[in-house]
Image (tube, rainbow, N blue to C red):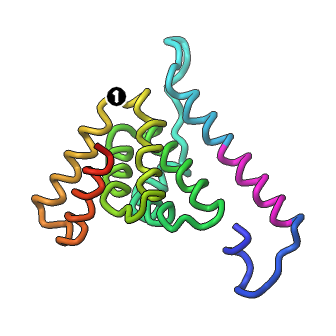
Amino acid sequence: IPSVITPPGCALHDGVRDASDRLLHLLLLHLHKLVHNRLAPSLADPPPRPVPFLDALKPHVPDLCAEVLRLERKRFLWHHQLLGLLGVYSPPHCAAEALAHLLTLARTQDELALATQLHAGLSACLPHLLPAALEACVSQIHAGGLPAAQVAQLCHNLALVL
């Protein structure tokens, strides 16, 4: 967040940086509670309430994936957590879309590790995530939605993962 709210070259006081980091951690924790408390409501409970922030993020999964793969400081970890929360909040489409994007766009081992970490974190509650992500990749290829370089990168990444 500090790099977003300050112009380039402007030094940020450590207290502001720490407070921003703490605030983001608290927001992510609150989102985590909202998402995971929705998973097992009892029959007496009212239907789970929507989480508008996550609903608003759904169309931005490709942008979140691109931000994750930038590996910029702590930001990529926050974005990665948001992808995981979106995957749990709106299965199976968001999770499969996010995993497909990460598998397609990852160029380094570190970037590819983020895809495998996302899968590991979501596979307990979404056991068919990998086939759904692969189906999304194949659909993109058949629709001509991926340039040849991205198809080659996806194949390379799948070979590395296997």
Instruction: Quadrant for residue 63, please give it.
Output: bottom left
Report the number of numbered marks: 1
The quadrant of the image that shows the N terminus is bottom right
11 versus 158 height, above or below: below
- Front-lying residue, 98 or 148: 148
Instruction: Quadrant for residue 59, please give it.
Output: bottom left
The quadrant of the image that shows the C terminus is top left
Task: Measuring from the top left, give residue 15's x and y in whole percent.
Answer: 89, 64
Q: Residue at x 61, y 38 (%)?
A: 32
Q: Residue at x 44, y 35 (%)?
A: 122
Q: Residue at x 58, y 27 (%)?
A: 37
Residue 63 in magenta?
no
128 versus 97 height, above or below: above
88 versus 4 height, above or below: above
Residue at the limit of the structure toward the left, as seen here: 142
94 versus 88 height, above or below: below
- Front-lying residue, 1 or 72: 72
Task: Measuring from the top left, give residue 160's x and y in whole percent.
Answer: 31, 51
Task: Measuring from the top left, give residue 143's x and y in whole percent.
Answer: 12, 62
Residue, disc 1: 127
- The range drawn in magenta is 16-28
Residue at the limit of the structure toward the bottom, as seen here: 9
Task: Measuring from the top left, give residue 79's x and y in whole percent.
Answer: 55, 56
Amino acid type of disc 1?
Answer: Pro
Count neighbours of disc 1 (C-alpha within 10 A) and say few if under 14, some if 14 to 19, many if 20 or more: few
Q: Residue at x 38, y 44 (%)?
A: 95
Dominant SS of magenta comes to helix
Q: Relative to residue 144, is residue 125 drawn left or right?
A: right
Which element type, helix, strand or loop, lies under badge 1? Answer: loop
Q: Relative to residue 127, is residue 84 drawn left or right?
A: right
